[in-house]
Image: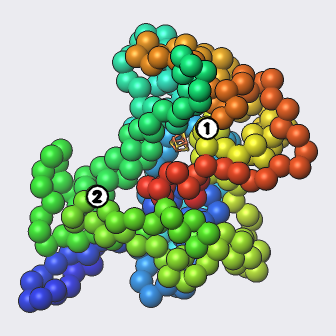
């Protein structure tokens, strides 16, 4: 925590980096370690849904080792395992249901999509809790002192500029260092390659309905363990939630995921721009 003076008042400034362990936020972290921004955050926070593909956890382990060389902490925090919680809800063991954006076949057969609460529950609230409790030292529901100011960095690049938005909390200012440097996702990849760093995999829950067909196909071909779990989850969500009317699907076509031919020449048509809190898929 840095101390300073603002309009004659002492204040404490905390800057944190929201880490998703994907391309943009990992590049932002490494750039910060290299001193490529005017300031450097105190730490990075990774909100773990427990459902990233194995390759993302491997990359995160590598990032932690790299950050350690600069004496830079990465906090891993969680609010449970999203997949386990979904399966427990389906089995009636809990009523917790933080909707992922599942696709719904309505009574009329028309496609719809569930309002998304998973990002809030398993990512955003987890990061806010870590800032409040671990960085500021507050208890549950304790008010943030007026002299504490927090800046939260998000790894959004210029090709996803629609995801930029203001914080919902008056004591937090959102900042987008990659946008300020006018960097695209490809610029991030080029920066990593130039320095000989390994390239991050795509981060997001392995079953996220926002995946592009290209990503679904890659998981199916390259991550068999994750794919098996996707097929099973897709089958179990179909009529798994008593409060939801209509059949649920992971894929926008409203077809069982294991029956879909993802073809060969696919566009990267992901829907992550709908996740404008800026914490998933970066
Ligand atoms: S990656 Fe997808 S399923 Fe996971 S928390 Fe984000 S929106 Fe929800």
Task: Say left or right for 140 vs 244.
Answer: left
The residue labelled by disc 2 is 168
Q: Residue at x 49, y 10 (%)?
A: 91
Q: Which residue is mark 1?
A: 209
For marks 2 and 1, the one nearer the N-term is: 2
Label 1, secondary structure: give it: loop
Q: Residue at x 12, y 64 (%)?
A: 145
The residue sitting at 62% across, 69% down in the picture is 159
Check the image and report above or below for 81 versus 36: above
Residue furthest to the right in view is 264
CA distance separating discs 2 and 1: 25 Å
Residue count near mark 2 (Cα–Cα under 10 Å), binned few <14, some 14–19, many ≥20: few
Residue 278 visible? The answer is yes
Does dot 2 land on a helix, a strand or a loop? loop
Disc 1 residue: CB within 8 Å of ligand 1: yes
Specify few, some or many for label 1: CA neighbours under 10 Å numbering under 14, 14-19, or 20 or more: many
- Considering every residue shown, the one lying at the far front of the view is 108
């Amino acid at each position: 925590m840095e101390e300073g003076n603002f309009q004659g008042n002492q204040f404490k400034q905390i800057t944190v980096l929201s880490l998703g362990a994907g391309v943009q936020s990992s590049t932002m972290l490494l750039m910060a370690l290299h001193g490529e921004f005017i300031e450097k955050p105190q730490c990075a926070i990774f909100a773990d849904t427990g459902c990233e593909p194995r390759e993302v956890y491997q990359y995160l382990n590598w990032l932690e080792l790299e950050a350690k060389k600069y004496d830079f902490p990465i906090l891993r925090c969680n609010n449970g395992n999203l997949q386990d919680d979904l399966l427990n809800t389906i089995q009636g063991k809990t009523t917790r249901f933080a909707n992922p954006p599942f696709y719904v076949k309505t009574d009329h057969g028309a496609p719809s999509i569930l309002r998304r609460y998973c990002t809030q529950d398993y990512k955003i609230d987890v990061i806010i809790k870590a800032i409040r409790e671990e960085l500021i030292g507050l208890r549950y529901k304790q008010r943030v002192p007026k002299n504490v100011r927090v800046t939260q960095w998000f790894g959004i690049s210029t090709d996803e500029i629609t995801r930029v938005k203001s914080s919902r909390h008056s004591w937090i200012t959102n900042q987008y260092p990659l946008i300020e440097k006018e960097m695209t996702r490809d610029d991030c990849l080029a920066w990593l390659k130039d320095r000989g760093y390994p390239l991050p995999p795509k981060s997001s829950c392995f079953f996220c309905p926002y995946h592009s067909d290209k990503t679904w196909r890659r998981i199916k071909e390259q991550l068999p363990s994750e794919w098996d779990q996707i097929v099973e989850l897709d089958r179990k969500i179909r009529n798994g939630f008593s409060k939801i009317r209509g059949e649920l699907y992971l894929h926008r076509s409203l077809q069982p995921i294991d029956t879909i031919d993802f073809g060969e020449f696919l566009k990267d048509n992901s829907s992550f721009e709908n996740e404008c809190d800026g914490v998933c898929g970066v």
